Amino acid sequence: MIRVRFAPSPTGSLHVGGARTALFNWLFVQHARTHGPDHDATFVLRIEDTDKQRSTDEFTKVILDGMTWLGLTWDEGPLFQGAGLARHQADAHRLLDAGTAYLDDGAIRFRVSHEEVAWEDAVHGPIAFHGKDLEDFVILRADGTPVYNFAVVSDDIAMRITHVFRGDDHISNTPKQILLYRAFGVPVPVFGHVPMIHGTDGKKLSKRHGATAVADYQHLGILPQAMVNFLALLGWSPGGDREVFFDAAELVEAFTFAGLQRSAAVFDPKKLEWMNAEHLRSLGAERVAGLIGDALAGLDPARAVALVAAVLPRGRTTLDVAHRARLRAGLDPVVFDEKAAAAVAQDEAGYRTALAAVAESLATATDWTAPALDIALRALAERMAVKVGTIMQPVRIALTGSTVSEPVNELLAVIGRDDVLRRLRTAAGA
Ligand code: GLU
């Protein structure tokens, strides 16, 4: 029987690091259900709300929402640490009665035995602390509230936790916790401390690095399955070069603690975007159009799918795909990016001339399909004795505000004749 827990403190939103800890616990449980000794594994969610000043119901909700969005289902809970106060107190008194703790100014202080404290960490291998480096520590304050390390051990014992997977930043707490397990005379769980997450500059991930909350990425148009895929690879590797897992079940299958790395993982938002794009494309235009239905409301469904199909190869997030599709549908205004503005500024007269010529020439086009438009544009460039790019790039800029897009003939085809001619004429100032 395997029992793990994720124990967030509701003193902030669910951040990338916490979500990754939750994910590793979840993957471990799911994997154990099919491959473990008795196929019995349970994921407990415990909200560590003992810091009453900083804990809020709102943060608890944000954490649960974030886990739900990622698909990280729990089997028991949410249990609240604060609800265990009577047990924390009773447990402290048990140690007092047993003589492994003593009264000190109204508080209960744990007596540290000066033996070595060592454990086989599931991530780091053997770790040892010398008992002489630890001092007797308070477990129950004079006001009757437990200290953090004590509440955690009391809870983990009560919840029959067999494996504790948490961030590296808790390594220094573990010797104290192991001594408490020994004092209670119960088996010590397996500990595994997962590496910290750094930004691309090698510094510990923080707000300076931009968005770090899971909810931020949700609102930026990242797919939950892409986020899960990305988080799983922050400090874990399935071995080999494989990075993209479209299905969480494949991650579950591949997940073992042997693949966990000891050194810090690097959080690269560019890589997350890349991975998200892979997931978007694997869904296909129809499903992505469904996901961004609100942004495309009012469009004929077949047209919406065609627009999404046109922009999907370059779309990075659902927001990005929605915006690119809306731009082509004429629902969002064209705004020049820096490169486009600079390109136009370089030769504004040439830009307008090219647009006017294309509009005039395409006004008589009989076949408004991508292949026919390509032929028409090339013929026009030849007649004007200019390179194809000389007329294509202004068209691309005028219609998208950007210097990169799908091939211009495809762009014209998806926007449609009437809109193209109207927009080109307006942009040409004709
Ligand atoms: N509540 C602790 C935290 O958020 C986790 C404690 C643990 O996993 O043992 O960092």
Image (spheres, helix red, strand yellow):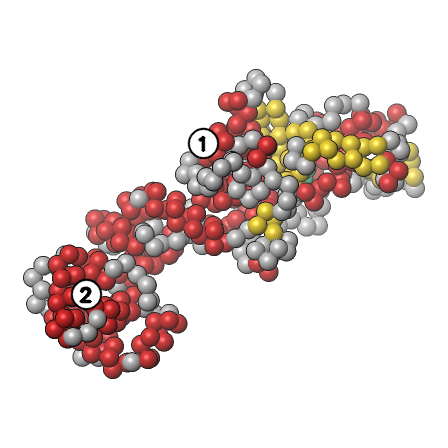
**As drawn, 305 above or below 257:** below
Between 158 and 188, the one lying in front of the other is: 188
Residue at (58% x, 18% y) in the render: 37
| Three-letter code for the amino acid on which mark 1 is drawn | Ala
Between 116 and 249, the one lying in front of the other is: 116
Query: Whole-percent x and y of residue 30?
Result: 52, 28
Residue 319 as seen in the image, left or right of residue 37: left
Tag of residue 249: 1
Q: Residues within 10 Å of mark 2 (few under 14, many from 20)?
A: some
Residue at (59% x, 32% y) in the render: 258
The answer to whether residue 109 is seen in the rendering is no
**As drawn, 110 above or below 291:** above
SS for callout 1: helix
Residue where numbered disc 2 is placed: 419
Query: Whole-percent x and y of residue 152?
Result: 72, 35
Query: Whole-percent x and y of residue 357?
Result: 16, 75
